[in-house]
Image (cartoon, rainbow, N blue to C red):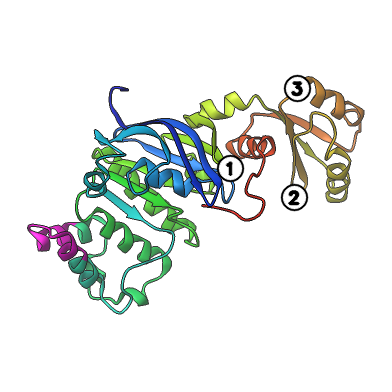
Amino acid sequence: MTPGAAIEVEGLTKSFAGRVVVDRLSLAVPSGRIMGFLGPNGSGKTTTLRMLCGLLTPDSGRGTCLGLDILTEAQRIKRQVGYMTQRFSLYEDLSIVENLDFIGRVFGLAERRRKVSQALDRLGLTARRRQLAGELSGGWKQRLALAACILHEPRLLLLDEPTAGVDPKARRDFWAQIHGLAADGMTVLVSTHYMDEAERCHLIAYIAYGRLLAKGPVAQVIAEAGLSTFTITAAADKVAELADRLTGLPGVDLVAPFGSALHVGGGDREQLLASLAPYRDNPALVWREDSATLEDAFIHLMGKSSDNFSNGPVS
């Protein structure tokens, strides 16, 4: 057992209708940390999250969550988990405070009114407590959903694409709340497609079509991708032309236009430099070697993974 691990699992495997959705996954998540799950759609991220916290039983493998066995003590684990789904699932014809009071009754919370009041204050919802949930914007619905998740004071928070369709300010406010919860000792698992959100996590895990390909702090994942990257600045028409010429060349794993600039990179530096060499002396092109980004690493890992769910994605 890893000291200080809130979750530690080994060899988790899960299949649906004969398809392996999660394939022999092993992972440790430290207590009080935020771990982000990244990967293409249908790669088993949601299934992984649910198995890690006892919401779904693996076909094989073993592990613990919050010191409890994920196979034999799943019911005890679930009582200590807050789960925020992709879609808003509270009652839109009830007010904010009525929704939270209802959740409190479902959990049979002692001192329910005090805990509802605390959740309202923490999420900045007190002034809107009488507003109907159906009248809230996406950002305020998100706050209400998070308040409902933490009402029973869970030790583990599970967030599945929590900020999809929410404006940038609301996303930033949401992440400030998440970091506050982690600072208080809560462990957070969050799946996201936003690179800026992944960079806010203490640790990330990249899952591609059921297999764990990379894990660790963001800087470590980027470094281990071993990418060399360049930015080429030119006239807009030259950028489009150059992108077409470079795409598919040996060693060129990623090509991404950004206005009047083109971002290129690859994992084999010698091959990449050889493919770029014929264009390096062109006076119309300005070259700058850059540090790889998390998005670069993400795209590179996607290119190395194969879709074994081509007949239809599985979460």
Identify the element where label 1 is drawn.
loop
What amino acid is labelled 1 in the image? Answer: Tyr
> Looking at the image, which residue is at 21% across and 72% down?
98
> Please, what is the three-letter code of the amino acid marked with disc 3?
Arg
Left or right, 46 with reference to 294:
left
Q: Mark 2 points at which residue?
A: 259
Is residue 236 inside the magenta stretch? Answer: no
Mark sitting earlier along the chain (1/3) = 1
Residue at 88% x, 26% y: name it.
Answer: 277
Look at the picture and state if 120 lies above or below 45.
Answer: below
Instruction: Give how far apart the Cα atoms at labels 1 and 3 are.
Output: 27 Å
Vertical comparison of 46 with 288: above or below? below
Looking at the rendering, the stretch of residues picked out in magenta corresponds to 103-118
Q: Which of 238 and 54 is in front in this view?
A: 54
**Which disc, if any, is residue 135?**
none
Give the Cα distance between marks 1 and 2. 32 Å
Circle 3 residues within 10 Å: few <14, some 14–19, many ≥20: some
Find numbered disc 3 in the image and state the secondary structure of the residue it sits on: helix
Which residue type does callout 2 highlight? Gly
Viewer can see residue 77: yes
Using a 10 Å C-alpha cutoff, classify the residue at mark 1 as few (fewer than 14 neighbours), some (14 to 19) or many (20 or more): many
Q: Which residue lies furthest to the bottom in this view?
A: 93
From the top left corner, tell me how far across and down residue 55 is, in percent: 34, 49
Query: Residue 143 vs residue 238: left or right?
Result: left
Percent across and percent down for residue 56 are 37, 48
The numbered mark, 1 or 2, whose residue comes first in the sequence reads 1
From what the image shows, is residue 142 above or below residue 222? below
Quadrant where the image shows the N terminus: top left
Return the mark for residue 269: 3
SS at mark 2 in the image: loop
